[in-house]
Amino acid sequence: MATIAPPAAGTGEESLIILQSLLCLLRERNILSRADIEELCRKVEARAGPLSCCAETAMAASADMHRMGSYIGQQYGGKHLRSR
């Protein structure tokens, strides 16, 4: 029986690729709307606030999420989140 090697240190890149692919798949199948993606961007951005324990990491995550949101919006379209 084959054994699975433990993940190497720094597997953040692999996780990011999986999550990006999942977001695209869910948007492609209309399970997530463009407004849902924009709301997720806002939530990630809120985590990057001044009280964040890992401010640098949270800011990087926020920037990645905004890039991902822009890509998904251009690729799949959809209605924007309504202003509150």
Image: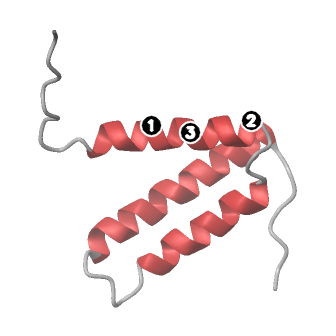
Give the side of residue 52 with respect to residue 70, left or right: left
The residue under label 1 is which amino acid type? Ile
Mark 1 is surrounded, within 10 Å at the Cα level, by few (under 14), some (14 to 19) or many (20 or more) other residues, namely few
The residue that disc 2 covers is: 28
Viewer-proximal residue among 24 and 72: 24
Vertical order, 58 against 71 (above or below):
below
**Which residue in the protein does label 1 denote?**
18
Question: Of callouts 2 and 1, which one flags the residue occurring earlier in the amino acid sequence?
Answer: 1
Residue drawn at 13 percent across, 25 percent down: 5
Question: Residue 82, position in %: x, y?
Answer: 85, 74
In this rendering, is residue 26 above or below 79? Answer: above
**Residues under labels 1 and 3: Cα distance?**
6 Å
* Quadrant of the rendered image containing residue 7: top left
Q: N-terminal of the two: label 2 or label 3?
A: 3
How many angstroms separate mark 2 from mark 1 (CA)? 15 Å
* Residue type, label 2: Glu
Q: Quadrant of residue 35?
A: bottom right
Q: Name the kind of residue labelled 3 in the image.
A: Leu
- Are the residues flagged by discs 2 and 3 in contact, CB closer than 8 Å? no
Q: Which residue is the site of mark 3?
A: 22
User: In the image, 44: left or right of 74?
Assistant: left
**Crowdedness near tag 2: few (<14), some (14–19) or many (≥20) residues, C-alpha within 10 Å:** some
Residue beneath the point at 60% across and 73% down: 42
